[in-house]
Image (cartoon, coloured by chain):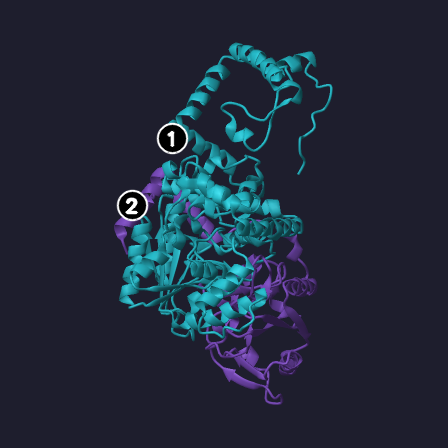
Chain colours: A purple, B cyan
Amino acid sequence: MSLSTKTAILDRIRRANGASGEDAARKASVAERLASRPRGIIPERGQLPPAERVALFVAMAEAAVATVALLPSIEGLPAEVARYLRERNLPATIRLGSDARLARADFTPTAIEVSRGPSDGEELNSLSHAEAGIAETGTLVLVSGQANPTSLNFLPENHIVVIDASTIEGSMEDAFAAIRRTWGEGMARTINTITGPSRSADIEQTLLLGAHGPKSLHIVVIDDL
Amino acid sequence: MQITSQNFRSNTVHALADKDLQRALGNVEKGFIGKRQTVVDKLPEFDALRDSAVAIKQHTLKHLDLYIEAYVEKVEASGGHVHFAEDAEHARRIFLEIARRRKAKTVTKGKTMISEEIGLNAFLEANGITPVETDLGEYIIQLRGEHPSHIIAPAIHTNRDQIETDFRRVHTHLDVGRDLTAPELLLAEARGVLRKRYAEADIGVTGANFLIAETGSSVIVTNEGNGDLTQLLGKCHVVFASIEKMVPTLNDAAQVLRVLARSATGQEATVYTTFSTGPKRPSDPDGPEEYHVVLLDNGRTNMLGTEFEDMLRCIRCGACMNHCPVYHAVGGHSYGWVYPGPMGAVLTPALIGVEDGKALPNASTFCGRCEEVCPMKIPLPKMMRHWREKEFEKHLQPKGARFGLGIWAFLARRPALYRLAASVAMPALKLLAGRKGRFSSLPLAGGWTEYRDLPAPEGRTFMQAYRQANGRPRVHAKPETSR
């Protein structure tokens, strides 16, 4: 690292602000903010009791052109995946990571060919488990790792994401807090928030789905409330 | 890139005569304004969130040195590297060192305005490295050998027919008889071509919408998913970001994201927001082996503590240009550099110098819509006025304009003389205009009368009319035109 450039830039910032890097009050103000993470303005829209929060999540996700199915338990997932692929005339294949929650779904009774690991770009359909949801915007929050490789979120054309209803939070701030509770303070390498399928309006401002990421996003909400 | 901001006037003459461009510019008003208003109306807290976002940025700028230190510590703890760059040349040199060490031949890129600011693509090509833009709009203009004309819709100046022509010219490995008549066919072709490029890239380059001091993360916001793939599949991820992208915490980013998505594309939320922290971990099945951040100053510290500091709050949403009558008329390329529209009119002179950028802050009707819609409440018209003052102080205006302003200033400071002059000039102009009541040509005002008539004064000065009306107009003034 170019230490001299760093020093020069930081010195200019201090001079412009008429401040010192050693000023205890400034340091305390920064340390306090980093520790307390003030939440700012949280829109009322998502601050609802759990069942209504799920309903809002579903409505907002659908408004962002995702499709949503509700299941009483994860045991019904293989049949739901099979139905989804069949109705869309998609090949009966699915790629997923090592997520323990998804391992509870037994695909053997279905005709679906299951493969595991990250995507190399050849797979058409992928399955992930979200860590949290955001009702305010119908957004999924996915965390990288062996359980849910990030490439599965972007490379396949059709992405199916399972989410437990109990993990649907009101706001993004609530979702971050929930992830900190489960994952601790250290950030996973990648956190993706996903609101609907990929899209572009770069050609004459015409909205088209499936730009580089998935053309379709199907959300399966497991009712564990 | 070649800066042509100094030729703003002649650029606009070409832009106004360009029929394809004028057709394409119609999409700016059609595509952005209504959508933004719809989602803003759906969020009662929108204005409160704007205030919250402004407060976050103001606090961060006042403590930027400390947040940068905290950020660097976190990036390094996660196995990443931060490189400080004084200017464009320095940033390019840092990147070339990384690229040489990794023997890079191909670089994929998510949309980054900083890479445009430092002229990265031309530099890479000159050094035998192939840059591949992956954002659909950026890809289109890369094929055309152009630069972005809008900070979030870089190819907004192009139309479908032109894109088809470019795809046929460049994608020669595909069937010549293929159908490309619909936008979705063009998109599918670009998707197919670019798909192959992600994984073969030695380096994936992205910008950053935010840098987060709390976690050492860089954040990008995309609808296509291209930036996300770029940083995931490249063997090494290099982030280019300017210092003012810093926010303290994830919660702070969440506040600003709400106003960003709505102001930029009129969405409740952008499809993908990706938080990247360091290189891939031992347990990660995918992700880059190395993670670098090039943190660029390039003139920004010189804006801190000055009348232009507020500009450092800008989150590059593009709302100001989407609502700007001047941008609607002349498009982004007329501005002659990376940043067009009202934000460009303020930022460009700060970064390239008022000597070359002086025309831009003059390209404003001061209608104030940019400030009205700016999610960060940046007083853009006020800052354009500051630049005009600087232009005057530095004697950069033509002699005639200075002379005219000098006479006006002399009179304006002497009210009695001013009223006397006005009371002579107004009836004289009325007399000269005759029955028509308008001038179709007028010495010293040819720039105006070449295109439209100048209405003649009624004969009385404002002060005379005011006194006769006892301070109350008999007829309420009607605006000449309504929006």
Characterize the local packing of mark 1: few (<14), some (14-19) or many (20 or more) Cα atoms within 10 angstroms: some
Q: Which structural element holds mark 1?
A: loop
- Residue at 67% of width from left, 73% of height from top? A69
Q: Measuring 59% from the left and 64% from the top, which residue is drawn there?
A: A208
Tags 1 and 2 touching, CB below 8 Å: no
Where the N terminus of chain A falls, by quadrant?
Answer: bottom left
Asked if residue B94 lies left or right of residue B22, the reply is left
Q: Secondary structure at mark 2?
A: helix
Task: Give the chain letter at badge 2.
Answer: A
Would you say A82 lies left or right of B111 here?
right
Task: Give the image location of residue A158, x and y in percent.
Answer: 57, 74
Mark 1 vs mark 2: give the one in front. Answer: 1
Q: Residue furthest right?
A: B474
Measured in 3D between alpha carbons, the distance from the residue under mark 1 to the one under mark 2, in whole angstroms, is: 31 Å
Chain ID for label 1?
B
- Is B39 displayed left or right of A173 in the figure? right
B392 or A47, nearer to the observer = B392
Q: Do the residues indicated by labels 1 and 2 lie within the same chain of the protein?
A: no
Residue B365, image x and y in percent? 54, 35
Quadrant including the C terminus of chain A: bottom right
Query: Is residue A82 positioned above or below B20 on the image?
Result: below
Of the residues shown, which amino acid type is indicated by label 1?
Leu
Mark 1 sits on what residue?
Answer: B396
Q: Where does label 2 land, which residue?
A: A8
Q: Is residue A20 visible?
A: no
Q: Nearer the viewer, residue B26 or B236?
A: B26
Residue type beneath disc 2: Ala
On the image, the x and y values in percent for residue B354 come to 38, 36
Residue B194, compared with residue A46, is above or below; it is below
Q: Position of residue B203 (x, y in %)?
A: 36, 66
Say the numbered circle drawn on residue B79: none
User: Can residue B116 be seen here?
Assistant: yes
